[in-house]
Every structure is written in structure tokens, then in C-alpha cells.
Image (cartoon, rainbow, N blue to C red):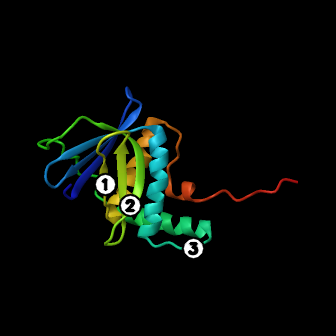
């Protein structure tokens, strides 16, 4: 696949799924269905990628979360969410694919690929730059809020583990 150009995530109520569209600089568009269960799994992998991308190695979870949250806000503030998704004039090789498997794959050159696969058949392996990774997190967070799935996908809340409380 050529370089990523744009991404879009839309909630489709009749499907109760998110439609994830990716278009490339070569004017190809790939479409994927994301279920609520899949998004929960995907979010955990995205957080792993963010921590690796920013090389966060603190053992204190609150410090790690604060750093990641700060970096996320900084990157998202620089991203372009104003430009309309350019779906006109692109080739869509197939109908949307229902994703069911995912993983991370180490690259020989460094970094990791986010691997998104259907139950059977060909999926997609994506290499995100820092900006695209943060943008995907923002799009997912906003789309799941619109879907009212109750996932609360926020960098700070999901990376921070609850502090054990003692009840007397």
C-alpha cells in the first residue's frame, strides 16, 4: 500500500459499527468495519504504540499517563481535522471488510506496524507516523462517543490504572 493520505471514522447506526476509511496518495480507498469489541482491543494496541513512539519508560503509571496525555494534546492541536475527507475520485477495491484480528509487528528498520485482519483473507498492515497515530486515537475516541458505546477512550483515563483503596 502506498502512503496514507487521510483517515475517516464514521458511526453507522444501522450496523452499530464504525466505518474506518483510509485513502492513500495513490487515490485508493480501503474500508473496514470496526465493532465495539474490536475497538476495545484496538485501543489497547494503540496505547502500546503511543508509549513506544514516545519512548515512555517510567514505571509510575500516573507519570506515564501524564506524559502521554500531554504529548497527545500537543500533537492533536497540530493536526488538520478541518480538511474534508476526499472520497471522491478514489478507487475502492472492495466492500468494507469486517476486522476481527489485530496485532503489532516489529519492523527491521525500527518501529512497528499495526496489523488489522479479517477472520479470513487479507487485511492491512499500517505504519503510522506520530501525527497519524494521535489523529487515529482522536477519531476513535470521538466516534465511539457519538456511537454511545460507553468506552470512554481517553488517553489519560485508559492508561491510568486505578489506585488500590483500603476500606476500613
Residue located at (43% from left, 62% from top): 49
Q: Position of residue 120 (x, y in %)?
A: 34, 39
Of all residues, the one furthest to the right in this rendering is 168
Query: Residue 147's quadrant in the figure?
Result: top left
Q: Which mark is residue 105?
A: 2
Q: Earlier in the sequence, mark 1 or mark 3?
A: 3
The reply to whether discs 2 and 3 touch (Cβ–Cβ < 8 Å) is no
Mark 3: secondary structure: loop
Q: Position of residue 150 (x, y in %)?
A: 53, 39
Quarter holding the C terminus is bottom right
Closer to the eye: label 2 or 3 = 2
Can residue 157 be seen from the camera position used here? yes
Distance from the alpha carbon under mark 2 to that under mark 3 = 23 Å
Q: Position of residue 58 (x, y in %)?
A: 57, 73
Mark 2: secondary structure: strand
In this rendering, would 18 be left or right of 149?
left
In this rendering, would 93 be left or right of 50?
left
Q: Earlier in the sequence, mark 2 or mark 3?
A: 3
**Residue under circle 1?**
125
**Residue under circle 3?**
58
Distance from the alpha carbon under mark 1 to that under mark 2 = 9 Å
Of all residues, the one furthest to the top in this rendering is 14
Q: Position of residue 162 (x, y in %)?
A: 67, 56
Residue located at (11% from left, 42% from top): 89
Amino acid at each position: 500500500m502506498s502512503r496514507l493520505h487521510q483517515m475517516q471514522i464514521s458511526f453507522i447506526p444501522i450496523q452499530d459499527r464504525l466505518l474506518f476509511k483510509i485513502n492513500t496518495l495513490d487515490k485508493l480507498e480501503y474500508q473496514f468495519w470496526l465493532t465495539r469489541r474490536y475497538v476495545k482491543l484496538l485501543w489497547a494496541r494503540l496505547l502500546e504504540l503511543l508509549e513506544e513512539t514516545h519512548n515512555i519508560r517510567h514505571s509510575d503509571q500516573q507519570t506515564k499517563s501524564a506524559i502521554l496525555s500531554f504529548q497527545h494534546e500537543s500533537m492533536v492541536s497540530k493536526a488538520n481535522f478541518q480538511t474534508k475527507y476526499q472520497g471522491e475520485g478514489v478507487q475502492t477495491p472492495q466492500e468494507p471488510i469486517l476486522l476481527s484480528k489485530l496485532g503489532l509487528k516489529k519492523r527491521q528498520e525500527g518501529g512497528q506496524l499495526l496489523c488489522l485482519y479479517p477472520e479470513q483473507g487479507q487485511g492491512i498492515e499500517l505504519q503510522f507516523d506520530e501525527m497519524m497515530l494521535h489523529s487515529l486515537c482522536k477519531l476513535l475516541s470521538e466516534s465511539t462517543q457519538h456511537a454511545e458505546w460507553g468506552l470512554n477512550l481517553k488517553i489519560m483515563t485508559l492508561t491510568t490504572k486505578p489506585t488500590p483503596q483500603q476500606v476500613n
